[in-house]
Amino acid sequence: MLRRRRATRADANTSIPRRQSPKHLLDLPPELLDAIIEEMAICDMAVLARACKAVKAYIEPRLHQKMYTRCGTPQDTKGLVDLLQTRPEKLPFVEILALDEYHPLVFSRNINLAPEKLSRPDIRLFNYSNLTHLRLANVDLSEFGNPGHGSFSLPQLILFWVEDCWYSAAALKRLVTSSNCLESIRLSALDGPPIEERILQPILPHAAPTLETLELEQRGMYHPRPFTFDLSSFTALRLLRIEPRLLLAPVGKNRGTYSTTENPDLADLIRRRLPPNLKVLLLSLTEPFAPEADTAQVIFPEDMELMQCLLEQRDAVAPKLKGLFMYYDENLAETKELNKLYDLADSIPVLMCALKRTGVVDLTWDGFDTDEDD
């Protein structure tokens, strides 16, 4: 009779191979390692990068992927330029760059300060191929319009935001035309020079094939010279923020004559000016002056007619429109006419609401980012 041999520990070790535990941090799956790094603070990432050369090579591109400046600290724009002059090897890692020289005294004490002027040495910040997102706020870009300061190379730039900056048409043109894949442009002129035709004409046509979002925000007591800009050829444009007077043939000092009284074929005018695949339209409809404390802002009659025409004839003028938003300052009056427009929008359906000028539209809302009708 054969006896069954008792299994030994050696047999178990040879028959069932054990899974080896990672001996090194970099032995972890890349998706798991990236998830861990994303939860780490910047200071902790800097400490981890000192572990060894292999870890440093993996961490450093993520450590310097985003760079921001803060006015009044050593991390201001000048400090960033000085850092990159002494450590130029960090520059190729930067993909997202935000220069914001907003000074707290401007808000707390209502003091007008000249924006930080960028000069020739600062061009190094905008002259490398990996930059994808660029946001500039409260800086003077006028010097960049000088072709003698060298050229810009931003082939992968997809987002370009300029807020409360001083600039020239030549400076913006040199920055924008250095990229052929721009998806988002925002020009916000709250206190700086106004948005005019000479600013838009050189830069927007270049970005037309790829541009998906365009935001033009103009506030203050300035009324731009009459001009129109035809966006019907911008087939990729999905979100547009604009004042009607910048889009629908403004005439006169204050408002545009785009009402049905002055232009009976308003629907055809809208169709010929709006992007054909527009999904979200954000309109600045109220006067840009601050109202009295006890006075509610009222939407102009021609703007009411504009929104009514957009909703009633959506299939003809903007067939893919899914969101219609109104920007205002304070105390927007809820009139019967406005409530009727809300009911009309619900019946289509188009999401319609009023937002303060600081409001942000989230394009991940249900229905905005779907392409079932594209």
Image (cartoon, rainbow, N blue to C red):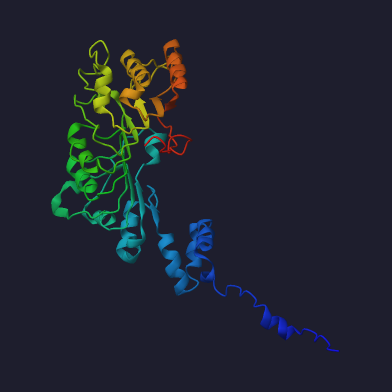
Name the residue nearer the viewer: 63 or 179: 179
Name the residue nearer the viewer: 243 or 195: 243
| Residue 233 horizontal side relative to residue 37, left or right | left
How many numbered marks have been drawn onto this rendered protein structure?
0
**Quarter-of-image position of residue 256:** top left
| Residue 44 horizontal side relative to residue 129, left or right | right
Give the residue displayed 39% in from the left and 48% down from the top.
70
The quarter of the rendered structure image containing the C terminus is top left
Percent of width and height locating residue 99: 34, 48
Residue found at the far front of this picture: 1
Percent of width and height locating residue 363: 43, 37
Residue found at the far left of this picture: 148
Percent of width and height locating residue 302: 31, 15
**Quarter-of-image position of residue 197:** top left
Give the residue displayed 24% in from the left and 43% down from the top.
207
Name the residue nearer the viewer: 149 or 267: 267
Q: Is residue 208 visible?
A: yes
**Quarter-of-image position of residue 106:** top left
User: In the figure, 14 relative to 224: above or below?
Assistant: below
Name the residue nearer the viewer: 71 or 254: 254
Give the residue displayed 18% in from the left and 36% down from the top.
201
| Residue 179 horizontal side relative to residue 54, left or right | left
Give the residue displayed 18% in from the left and 54% down from the top.
151
Percent of width and height locating residue 251: 20, 19
